[in-house]
Amino acid sequence: MSVVAVTLLGGCDVGSAFGGFGWPQGGITEQSQRMYDLWIASVVAALLVGVFVWGLIFWCIGMYRKGKVGSELPTQTRFNLPIEILYTVLPFLVISVLFYYTAVIQTDVNKVSANPDVTVDVVAFKWNWQFNYPEGNDVGAPVVESTVGDSSYIPIVVIPINRTVRFREHSQDVIHSFWVPELLFKRDVFPGNVYNEFQVTATKEGHYVGRCAELCGTYHSMMNFELRAVTPEKFAQYVAALKAGKTTPQALEAIGEKPYATTTTPFPTKRDAE
């Protein structure tokens, strides 16, 4: 068990040499890095088990091939208790270790602290987004500013890096899904009195496209937004600019950022097309 545990904990450096074994390597949060490490460690553990099994198969082929042993079969054994115990206990140990680390990391990824550094209220509607910056963490806290998207404007949500950010989600109509691919995480947005939430700690600055990942109607594919991860200093200046009455584009320009989305553009809805 200890050998498997060490493999799980130390296998994360292997992924970069093999393209992540199919797992995206562009995660920008602490949570996405933990999920990536678990994936790489699981693949390494599976490969070790595979190599062991393949080794036994090829050893048997080499040792007991017909040309070597003649027409006589090798000695047959029955009720080999040590081997039976090994084949029962070893898989159980591997599964137990994988289950343990999966449960630990899943709990960590879903963890929401009582007092995050920043709370962003996400409001989804057909077919766009509204991002509110409340002054507190409670539902109904006074809102500093709202950014609302429409068919001609991609809404931008700004968060600080190296700070805990809680996204609290609500829908005004049907089920949507808040998804930024680089977060390696998405969560559904429900209507009614349901407030879904999750928490991330971004580690990389940048501009990242966001999408709705739940089929929600005619213009579902056009329901995009942009996530901006900036330094805590820039974020404080951004919020101060919003409080001073500046619009989102003006506040972004005030901190040296592009005023409009750079990762996606508004889609023509063609509602007036004949």
Image: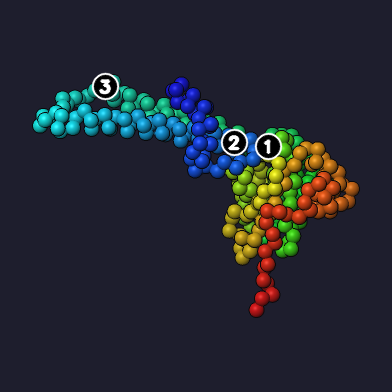
Q: Are marks 2 and 1 in contact (CB under 8 Å)?
A: yes
Cα separation, mark 3 vs mark 2, equals 42 Å
Question: Upstream in the sequence, badge 3 or badge 1?
Answer: 3
Q: Going by the image, does 5 lie left or right of 210?
A: left
- Tell which tag, 3 or 2, sits nearer the viewer: 2
On the image, the x and y values in percent for residue 56 come to 29, 29
Point 70% across, 51% down: residue = 226
First in residue order: circle 2 vs circle 1: 2
Task: Report the residue at 64% width, 61% height from top.
Answer: 222
Residue lying farthest to the left in this orientation: 71
Residue type, numbered disc 3: Leu
**Kind of residue sitting beneath label 1:** Thr
Mark carried by residue 203: 1
Q: Position of residue 126 (x, y in %)?
A: 67, 61
Label 2: how many Cα within 10 Å (few below 14, some 14–19, many 20+): some
Question: Disc 2 marks which residue?
Answer: 33
In this rendering, the label closer to the viewer, 3 or 1: 1
Question: Which residue corresponds to the image point at 31% horizontal and 23% vertical from the top-left?
Answer: 85
Regarding mark 2 in the picture, which secondary structure is present there?
A: helix
Task: Locate the N terminus and report the quarter of the image it occupies.
Answer: top left
Residue under numbered circle 3: 81
User: For residue 217, which numbered disc appears in the image?
Assistant: none
